[in-house]
Image: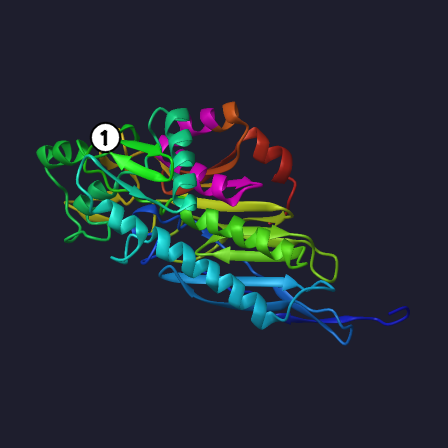
Amino acid sequence: MLGIRCSYTAVPARWLRPNTLRSLRHSSQVCPALCLLLASALLAGCGEKIEEFGGPTMGSHYSLKYVPGETTPEPAAIKADVEALLAEVDQQMSTWRADSDLSEFNRLPAGSCRAMPAPVLELVRFGEQLSVGSDGAFDLTLEPLLDLWGFGPHSRGERVPTAEEIAEVRQRTGHHHLRIDGDQLCKDAAVQLDLNSIAAGYTVDRIAARLVEQGVHSYLLDITGEIKAAGHKPDGTPWRIAIEAPRDDQQVAQKVIALDGLGVSTSGDYRNYFEQDGRRYSHTLDPQTGRPISHRLASVTVIDPQALRADGLSTLLMVLGPERGMAYAEREQIAAFFVTREGDGFVTHSSPAFARQFDGDQP
């Protein structure tokens, strides 16, 4: 390679709308504010290149870009492994397919137990941690409420329910109704689990770990908008993503950041909502009221070494809102980027952890 000048052939950047899941992550848990600027390049004539593939998954899309290592299997084998893991998660956690493990648990009456796959129990435990740590702002048992408002897999259309309807459904929500007994998940009320706020992030972490096992140490992985990147491209530049400005009419980069060994998740309320009588109703529900959030926070992006944590925390902070969310991020040292509505525009705020890591990056 000495003395050879390697040139790159740029592939046009693509903007992908993240998290439009139907089979796994339904619209209520969409994290629509993260738009990816996946600028990829091929190293021409130098032997090293970026491999790339993708396809449909969870009602949306996944994509993987990676630099093969010396012992990395052929791309077809990598793709087969990735899609096998995606299929496994779908079979275990989908709320949109009737034969999934989660759907079968959800159909059980109060007082029932069912043996569940270890990954499902892992996510239930993680969800319980977030719920306890946030005084109930995060909740994995909201599916009946999501259906009631028209955002769930079994909804009958978007509408504003009555206070009585909300109160009745809320009796069947709450982590305190769940219990893990060995390999069994039990419920003392007819609760229905919805893992869509953390399942995609979990899947990103699992596939990223598998890539490392296969000798891949440089990659950019996107599953329905949940992101993780590590290493560098062949030219030595980092993988970059763009945090999208929360606009309904077009996709505009709010901030571009470089990633290495980090997961990214964004939650927002500006693409999945409905309006009735001049009022806007977000798909993000507050577990403590059973109603859509109504504060000024338009989107929040969380960056964490674990895509699972980033995924769950972005939803949690979105529920808390700008003031309580920032206080939580500061207390827990979370790298979070908040976009709030101010009049006809938007104002951005970085948590201290985010500012230390990323506020020097140029958009």
Numbered marks: total: 1
Residue 74 rendering spot, x and y as whole percentages:
63, 71
Q: Is residue 148 visible?
A: yes
Q: Among all residues in the image, which is located at the extreme right?
A: 3
Badge 1: few (under 14), some or many (20 or more) residues near its Cα, within 10 Å?
few
Which amino acid, by three-letter code, is at mark 1? Answer: Thr
Residue 221 located left or right of residue 145: right
Magenta residues (range): 302-328
Q: Where in the figure is residue 298, as x and y percent of width and height? A: 38, 41
Q: Is residue 17 visible?
A: no
Q: Where 73 sits versus 217, above or below?
A: below
Q: Is residue 320 magenta?
A: yes
Residue for badge 1: 289
Nearer-the-camera pick, 56 or 38: 56
Which quarter of the figure is the N terminus placed in? bottom right
Residue projecting furthest to the bottom:
45
Rendering coords of residue 163 (x, y %): 11, 33
